[in-house]
Image (cartoon, grey):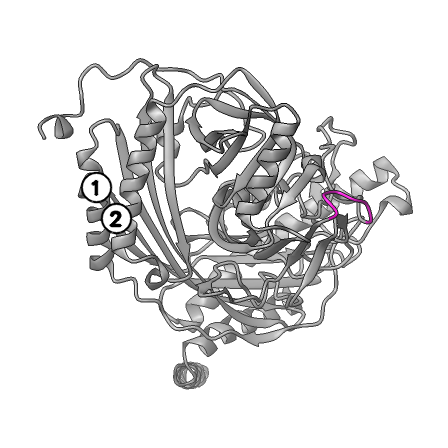
Amino acid sequence: MMKSQSKTTLLLFGVFSALVCRGLAQGGAEEVIFKAMEDELRRSVSQLALEHYQPPFFVAYQLADVRTLTVKATLGELCQSQEHHLRPDWMRLMVGDYALNDENFVGGRPSFFLGASDFLPLPLENDYAAIRRAFWAQTDGIYKSALETYDQKLTALKQQNKSDSERIDDYTKVAPTHLIVKSDPINFDQPRWEQAAKELSAVFRSYNQVLSSVVFLSFVDASVYLTSSEGTRVRFPVSVACLWINVFTQAEDGEPLADHLAYCARTPDQLPPLARLRAEAKGLADSILALRTAPVFADAYTGPVLFEGDAVAILVFQKLFDQQQGLISFREPIYAVDNPGQARNADRLEGKVGQRICSNRLTIKAVPKRQSFGDLPLVGTFEVDAEGVVPKDELVLVEHGILRTLLNDRVPTQTVKESNGHSRLALMGGGYLTPMKAPGVIEVSYADGSSLPELRKELLSEAAANGLNSIYLVRRLNRMNPGMNRDMRGASIRTPVLSRPAALYRVDTKTGAEQLVRSAVFSEFPVTNFKRVTKGCKDQQAFNLVLPVGSAELPVSFILPQALVFDDVSLEKARTTRPKLRLVPNPILARQ
């Protein structure tokens, strides 16, 4: 009788499960994913507990449905072409409470509980049970690890006896968000872009002094699902299409020289047409060959420097939105051992709210929801951040030179107590995503600026009146990107204060004539240099960039003045290793 009842029970459970799965399937893939995540999340919050320990107070699950295409070509031939579909997951679990939890702590020993065997991959199909199982396995291990970290943190706080004035909450409460940002799947058209990569890379076959060249394409199309124990339920797209053209050669004295072109758009169809790309690839080859024979920079220079176009974008990103010293909030963690001897960065802007940090003509705003600038769609735009927080349409960071606030996520700092919706998802290798505090769309304006021709005329006239025979103009700064790392090894023996100029010109103050020079680096460039901005353009232009942030890459858009003038910048001759020139030419190029 018992066996018969058991069989009946199992049969009924099987029928019920089949009906649930059929109902979910009819509701669409989105509902299957959300229901699996939310059902497992509720179970974790209500049942997850270890003897003598408290349950988690916050749990968030994230699933990203990601497609990627990577294409690489050199000298007209494909080196790589791979399309992948993957589903990376990520979760955040905290024990304690909003005021004090296991985060914002650097421990003194590794976790005993957490092991790689606790993690299971997510299925590519919308399998309700398999999705729940993957999150279940990960939650268990992370919960146990969080408990150990929390205990270590409590012990450290008791030993260090920190006062209440030194303590701030560990996490900010926010209202739950319900937002579905619709997006259509992007057509990668792999054969089309393989052919484009081959045609662009073939341009360099006729340049026998270009020692190596590569065309690299990287497309990402993702739908991100996020749920939390607070009730947040959001879905939003992450898409970017990048094309890099990298070239490398050596000057006649052996100096390594690298240059690049970089294009970034939301979708492949928004990249420039092939005819334009081909013409600009030829221009890149011509410019690096001109750099080979350009005169070497003098030993030192301090004076006015004009940054134009692309160089303004890289300058602003590296100096004003750097993770260590820019307009991004910083939270000093609790250490297992007090005063671990780590150097504090004097350039940090944390704590300088209300003070002047740059020229009083500069205003800097975050405009994360802005979709386009003129006809250019902006890649940094987003409607909801990686923590489910909806940012304001406009956030003033710097107003006429005065620092008003910093970009922040849900971790409070001494300066910024609440999130302003700037937890972004950066791109890791292989299509994985990682959250970090970072900009999306940034607008920089210069009050009472002039046109670019007027600015140049005024600058040269003033420099001549001050007894300067020449000043310097930077049109492009090097930026590391896929395909460039290999050829840049040994190019510099120290970490630069600002990227090395890829296009630096000496400008005659009397005639305005420009002369390309090489072998220069910035000897120093503190954030305080932005107080020395003396001129700027009234006209703006937009730049879509994917820039390195640690081991990840971040899509960001800048709307910037066409040019900025700094009146006191130091340049010096680069101290680089100069390998001997190759004795035998490239066999492919030599036979042409």
Distance in Å between CA atoms under marks 2 and 1: 7 Å
User: Circle 1: is it few (<14), some (14-19), or many (20+) Cα within 10 Å?
Assistant: some
Against 127, is 589 above or below? above
Q: Tell which of 62 and 413 is nearer to you.
A: 413
Tell me the quadrant of the picture where the N terminus can be found. Answer: bottom left
Circle 2/circle 1 CB separation < 8 Å: yes
User: Circle 2: is it few (<14), some (14-19), or many (20+) Cα within 10 Å?
Assistant: some
Residue extent of the magenta highlight: 354-360
- Amino acid marked by disc 1: Val
Instruction: Tell me the chief SS of the magenta region.
Output: loop
Q: Tell which of 583 and 229 is nearer to you.
A: 583
Disc 2: which residue: 278
Disc 1: which residue: 203
- Amino acid marked by disc 2: Arg
- Find out whether residue 356 is within the magenta segment: yes
Against 258, is 113 above or below? below
Q: Closer to the N terminus: mark 2 or mark 1?
A: 1
**Residue under the image location 64 percent in, 33 percent down:** 462
Residue 428 placement (x, y as % from top left): 45, 48
Q: Residue furthest left?
A: 591
- Find out whether residue 162 is within the magenta segment: no
